[in-house]
Amino acid sequence: MRTSAAGNSAARGFTLLELLVVVAIMALASAGVGFALADSGQMRLQREGERLAALLESARAQSRASGAAVRWRADAEGFHFDGVAPGTLPQAWLDRDTQARGAATLWLGPEPLIGAQQVVIVNSQLPGEAVRVATDGLRPFTAQALR
């Protein structure tokens, strides 16, 4: 006759506590993945503003290197850099619903110091959200969310 002493059981299962710990770890991991994958509209608009700031700084550097004045202007189809070689800089927004608010024209050089300038970009799918891309004339352009 076989007897089973504590700890010698042939069929041993998981305890309720072990199962709860595993479920809690899985819930935390899936929540972290969900937050990492979520891309809100505000994040897309902020990314668009940061891209525009980088493009403006690139055009500003090209203007200083060539000695030619460069102007950035927005229109219904996107934006344009006047004074740089065609095709060297993008001329469209990443999201086609993005546009500049108001009349947007920026002068980017060739002087090392330019006047304080800004442009506000919005997305028609995100009412009430906006991003300002601005410089004080000395520092680089930066993107800042407006609420």
Image (cartoon, helix red, strand yellow):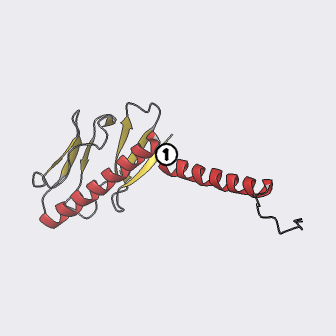
Judge by depth and name the residue closer to the eye, 143 or 13: 13
The image position of residue 84, as x and y in percent, is: 13, 55
Q: Residue at x 83, y 69 (%)?
A: 8
Q: Which residue is drawn at 22% across and 63% down?
A: 61
Q: In this view, does 34 lie to the left or right of 66?
A: right
Which residue has dot 1 on it? 38
Q: Is residue 98 left or right of residue 107?
A: right
Judge by depth and name the residue closer to the eye, 59 or 92: 92
Q: In this view, does 67 lie to the left or right of 20?
A: left
Q: Which residue is drawn at 43% across and 33% down?
A: 126
Tag count in the figure? 1
The image position of residue 134, as x and y in percent, is: 37, 51
Residue 22 appears in which quarter of the rendering? bottom right
Toward the left, the furthest residue is: 85
Q: In this view, does 49 lie to the left or right of 77?
A: right
For numbered disc 1, what is the local secondary structure? loop
**Which amino acid, mark 1?**
Ala
